[in-house]
Amino acid sequence: MKLIHQIKSEENLLINTVKNTLQLAKQTTNCSIEVFIKKTIGINVNVRNNIVENVEFNSDGALFITLYNKFSKGSVSSRDFSLNGIKKILEIALDISKNSSSDFFVGLPELKLLCFHAQDLDLFYPSELNIKNGIHFASIAEKEAFKFDKRIVNSEGSFFSNHITINVFGNSLGMLEKYKSTIYSAYNCMIAKDKNSMQRDFYYSNSRKIENLEKPDILGKRTAQRAISRLGSKKINTMKASIIFSREISSNFFSHLVPAISGDNVYRKSTFLLNDLQKKIFPIWLNIIENPHIPQGLGSKPFDNEGVKTSIKYIVENGILKTWLLNSYNSRKLGLISTGNSGGTYNWLISNQNISFENLLENMNTGLLVTELMGQGVDIVSGNYSQGAMGFWVENGKIQHPVNEITISGNLKDMWFNILSISNDIDMRNKIQCGSILVSEMQISGN
């Protein structure tokens, strides 16, 4: 009850701060304004080899102001919520706007797009910020990993976090809305060793509710299993072969679509998908639905960073790209309407063909199962893709041995269009929720 009282008190303080900022702006400037406050309270605990390496308690808040002075704007942030502090940053924002170049496309969103009644998305499940319990959770995960097999010889750390976030948004068009959320995370990374090699691997869990977090003993055992499975890794020859992106990295596979259809990159003509709106870029059976309103969803939000109401929509329907991701500014640049994506994307639901991961291996027959990616080798202007990879070689639909020190490459257009199948082993730990992905062919660089 003490925590709930504290959160309610913080929420009231933030609401009053936004109200005060809007009122002061009305009195002292002749400008449009939007005000956003985000306050996060939580703990982080890190344990390594049964020693507490790091304990953090954070209570971080920031006030963000964007002032629109006709067709110029000034943006300022501050951690000072006092009236004098607000007056100062309003003066700074006004001064910046007066010295900024005029841009016809800047300004508040259209009134009809704003969220005046924020939907309750069931995101708030607070529990006491108990350091002792956090240490206990992280320690159990690590201990269970060590107990699982003698080949687990060291730890890279076991982590637990518990965070509460309060968001309050208001603007001079009369919007004043708020929502709260919680997020619990756990992570464990272990090192396995045999006579010939050492390998590391990790596993993690996150959830809006602490009771839905993976139990620490299960987390530790899964980490140990993954690390041990990597022992005996081999290089393979350079070749072209079929590839499966495992469920753990399938969100990464689709994450490259986000900047490629971002309004900023579209109006700057710096995306390889510039001419592909309303065109087929995936197989005809593939759909991507963005749903910001999933209860307890990790990517759920009632409104975006400009106060625009979020909505359920097709990103891809029957393989066809249906929309760009737009905020108010880039939508005006393109002569379109904001899609409510200021600040990013929400829950992306990727369709699958309702087959198991084992069926997917059988369908591939021979090729590479990729379970981890390294590097940032993706060019959104050209679509060229090249990343370091680790995984397992598969023959006759069965995993044969682990593989490391390889690079996989191709072009995103070809990779997306050549998806043969997606299995139903959906990973729910990310905003992009997808099963394992079978791609017909990619270049593998090895020996």
Image (cartoon, rainbow, N blue to C red):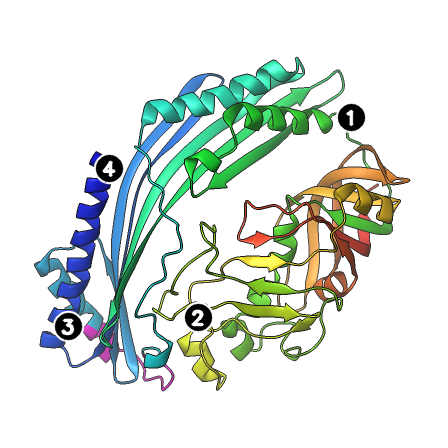
Place of residue 36 in the rendered image (x, y in percent of width and height, measured from the top left): 27, 62
Place of residue 443 in the rendered image (x, y in percent of width and height, measured from the top left): 81, 53
Mark toward the viewer: 2 or 1: 2
Residue 214 sits inside the magenta stretch: no
Which mark is drawn over residue 340? 2
Gap in angstroms between the C-alphas marked 4 and 3: 33 Å
Q: Are marks 3 and 2 in contact (CB under 8 Å)?
A: no
Q: Dot 4, how many residues are within 10 Å of its Cα: few (below 14), some (14-19), or many (20+)?
A: few
Point 33% across, 26% down: residue: 131
The span shown in magenta is 94-107
Please state which amino acid type lies under the numbered disc 1: Gly
Please state which amino acid type lies under the numbered disc 2: Gly
Residue 136 vs 96, above or below: the answer is: above
Q: Secondary structure at mark 3?
A: helix
Q: Which residue is mark 1?
A: 232
Q: Secondary structure at mark 2?
A: loop
Task: Looking at the image, tell me whether mark 2 or mark 1 is earlier in sequence order.
Answer: 1
Q: Which residue is mark 4?
A: 3
